[in-house]
């Protein structure tokens, strides 16, 4: 398969693997839930590459719908490449604003996106999907990156969103009025998207000119654009006028079926009986939900200006606060199509938190309990993303949207990125992560399974049961004590049997030999080196 080449690709290909796990520190005062929890609606403050890695132990294969709205790389957004990739060329990129004059701007954008897309894929449930907003600046490169990360067979569609309602008179060539939303499935065979309810406008197309007892109907073509011999014959209308399918076509049914439909009053020859026959389709017989089309007009899902007005109703200084919000209806449509009532929705470029707003609005509409997980940089996470959620949840008097005026309800926990869990730092004792953060990290890395903090027992060191093991972590945040900590024979005998499965024990060292370990059905893993030993794989 042809693939996209760009400067720095070889350095970022596996960068997501070496990004260190970070602690996630709750900031209770910034959230609205009584107790901060990673299983709550979440806003995480920090760089999204690190934050995604930190969330992976909790949300691996748990997210049904991802929406992201990354920088479009227009050349005037003021974004800078900031990932700590081990390459002198790329270190030279750090902190420099990517503008139109930058000859490597597309390379930088691809280098920024590739590891993020790779991590995002890990979050999706098997039946999940990712929606990525983008415009003509990078759509073609994004599509290549997504083909590479998600597999081209998992491409679902590119949606066109009509973001503008007026013509830009000073456009040089054509007045651009749309952007794209590129959709990929985690696994196209398992993807299930919901349909959309027929709108009143769509139902208006159904009428009942012949007072049919079966109710309103519309008519569909009775012709097939292919000449099949068995379906080419004359049909006589009620006035005696005869109809033959035009050359190169045929009727959609054979003679017997047409007679049957006719006897059931399902063939329509127009008000005066002289038009070419068509097939009646009753509203009562068509599916209530229909697949969404790939063209989304501003009349259905809002436009850029309506999104700004929505934000202005929440923040008096919206214009200065944030320039590129998306309309709530646009995100709500994605949520309606791609989630069930208990799904998790992830947005790693949260901005003004339209995604959270849409999740709360959809929950209020259908009584669902969807959760959102948002990531946003320190610049906006508290004052914009979290503040919008605080406001729409409790209600905003100035809002024209009745639901927002009354308050959409819902609470969230706020976390920020803590210290990295660097193996070298654990080894020399310079930065020791707290017990729970290390336990979450060790458990996920060794087992690929989600860690449950409620099961943790600091006294015995038990941190969870995986498919094949009861897992223990002998660890303390005190550097001096940590140096002394070892799995001894007495300690090994004292480890409780939680599920009866063999034990997997992480500790800095051990003072007992292999034969005892075998007898006690213990696999020993030395901290920190053997954390990556995927014993349960
Ligand atoms: C186009 S905006 C998203 C707008 C959002 N969809 C809305 O409706 O408000 C992109 C956002 O991603 C954030 N962002 C960009 N790079 C980031 C990174 N590396 N980590 C975290 N956030 C980032 C920016 O701060 C900005 O708020």
Image (tube, helix red, strand yellow):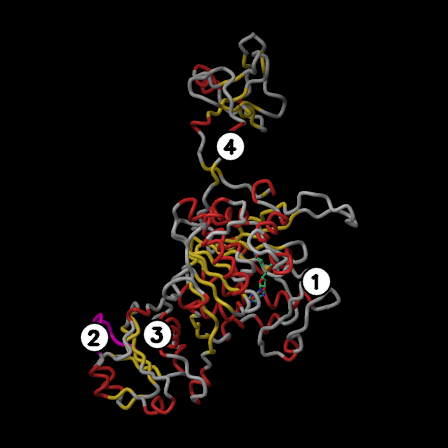
From the top left corner, tell me how far across and down residue 252 is, in percent: 52, 25
Q: Are marks 2 and 4 in contact (CB under 8 Å)?
A: no
* Rendered position, 214 above or below 292: above
User: Could you give the CA–CA distance between mark 3 and mark 1, rounded to whole angstroms?
Assistant: 48 Å
Give the secondary structure at mark 3: loop
Q: Earlier in the sequence, mark 3 or mark 4?
A: 4
Residue, x 47% and y 78% (percent of image)? 420
Q: Are marks 3 and 4 in contact (CB under 8 Å)?
A: no
Give the secondary structure at mark 1: loop
* Rendered position, 457 above or below 314: below
Residue, disc 3:
535
Residue, disc 1:
76
Residue, disc 4:
200
Query: Which callout, 2 or 3, points to the residue nearer the camera?
Result: 2
Q: Earlier in the sequence, mark 3 or mark 1?
A: 1
Residue, x 57% and y 71% (percent of image)? 12
Asked if the beta carbon under badge 4 is closer than 8 A to the nearest atom of ligand 1, the reply is no
Q: Earlier in the sequence, mark 2 or mark 4?
A: 4
Residue, disc 2:
497
User: Could you give the CA–CA distance between mark 1 and mark 4, rounded to whole angstroms?
Assistant: 41 Å
On the picture, is 340 further left or further right than 45? left
Instruction: Look at the image and give the residue range highlighted in magenta.
Output: 496-504
Q: Earlier in the sequence, mark 1 or mark 2?
A: 1
Q: Earlier in the sequence, mark 2 or mark 3?
A: 2
Q: Earlier in the sequence, mark 1 or mark 4?
A: 1
């Amino acid at each position: 398969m042809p693939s996209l080449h760009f400067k720095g690709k070889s350095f970022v290909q596996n960068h997501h693997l070496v990004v260190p796990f970070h602690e996630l520190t709750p900031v209770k005062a910034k959230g609205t839930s009584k107790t901060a929890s990673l299983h709550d609606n979440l806003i995480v403050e920090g760089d999204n590459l690190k934050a995604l890695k930190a969330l992976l132990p909790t949300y691996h294969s748990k997210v049904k719908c991802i929406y992201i709205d990354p920088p479009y790389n227009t050349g005037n957004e003021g974004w800078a490449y900031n990932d700590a990739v081990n390459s002198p060329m790329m270190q030279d990129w750090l902190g420099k604003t990517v503008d139109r004059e930058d000859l490597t701007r597309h390379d930088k954008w691809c280098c920024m996106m590739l590891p993020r897309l790779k991590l995002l894929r890990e979050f999706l449930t098997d039946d999940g999907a990712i929606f990525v907003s983008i415009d003509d600046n990078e759509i073609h490169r994004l599509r290549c990156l997504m083909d590479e990360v998600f597999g081209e067979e998992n491409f679902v569609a590119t949606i066109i969103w009509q973001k503008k309602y007026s013509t830009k008179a000073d456009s040089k060539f054509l007045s651009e009025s749309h952007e794209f939303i590129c959709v990929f499935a985690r696994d196209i065979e398992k993807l299930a998207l919901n349909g959309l309810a027929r709108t009143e406008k769509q139902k208006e197309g159904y009428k009942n000119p012949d007072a049919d007892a079966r109710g309103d109907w519309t008519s569909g073509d009775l012709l097939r654009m292919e000449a099949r011999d068995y379906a080419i014959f004359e049909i006589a209308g009620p006035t005696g006028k005869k109809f033959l399918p035009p050359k190169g076509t045929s009727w959609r049914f054979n003679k017997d079926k047409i007679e049957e439909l006719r006897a059931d009053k399902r063939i329509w020859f127009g008000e005066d009986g002289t038009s070419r026959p068509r097939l009646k389709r009753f509203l009562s017989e068509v599916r209530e939900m229909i697949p969404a089309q790939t063209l989304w007009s501003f009349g259905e899902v809002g436009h850029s200006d309506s999104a700004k007005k929505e934000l202005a109703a929440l923040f008096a200084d919206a214009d200065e606060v944030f320039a590129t919000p998306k309309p709530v209806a646009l995100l709500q449509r994605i949520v309606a199509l791609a989630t069930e009532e208990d799904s998790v929705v992830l947005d790693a470029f949260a901005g003004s938190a339209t995604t959270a707003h849409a999740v709360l609005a959809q929950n209020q509409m259908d009584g669902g309990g969807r959760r959102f997980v948002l990531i946003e940089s320190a610049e906006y996470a508290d004052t914009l993303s979290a503040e919008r959620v605080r406001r729409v949840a409790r209600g905003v008097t100035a809002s024209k949207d009745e639901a927002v005026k009354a308050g959409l309800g819902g609470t969230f926990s706020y976390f920020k990125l803590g210290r990295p869990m660097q193996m070298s730092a654990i080894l020399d004792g310079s930065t020791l992560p707290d017990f729970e953060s290390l336990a979450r990290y060790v458990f996920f890395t060794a087992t690929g399974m989600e860690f449950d903090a409620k099961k943790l027992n600091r006294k015995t060191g038990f941190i969870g049961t995986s498919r094949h093991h009861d897992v223990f972590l002998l660890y303390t945040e005190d550097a001096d004590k940590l140096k002394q900590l070892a799995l001894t024979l007495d300690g090994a005998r004292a480890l409780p049997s939680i599920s009866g499965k063999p034990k997997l024990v992480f500790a800095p060292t051990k003072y007992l030999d292999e034969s005892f370990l075998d007898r006690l059905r213990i696999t020993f893993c030395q901290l920190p080196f053997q954390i990556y030993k995927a014993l349960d794989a």
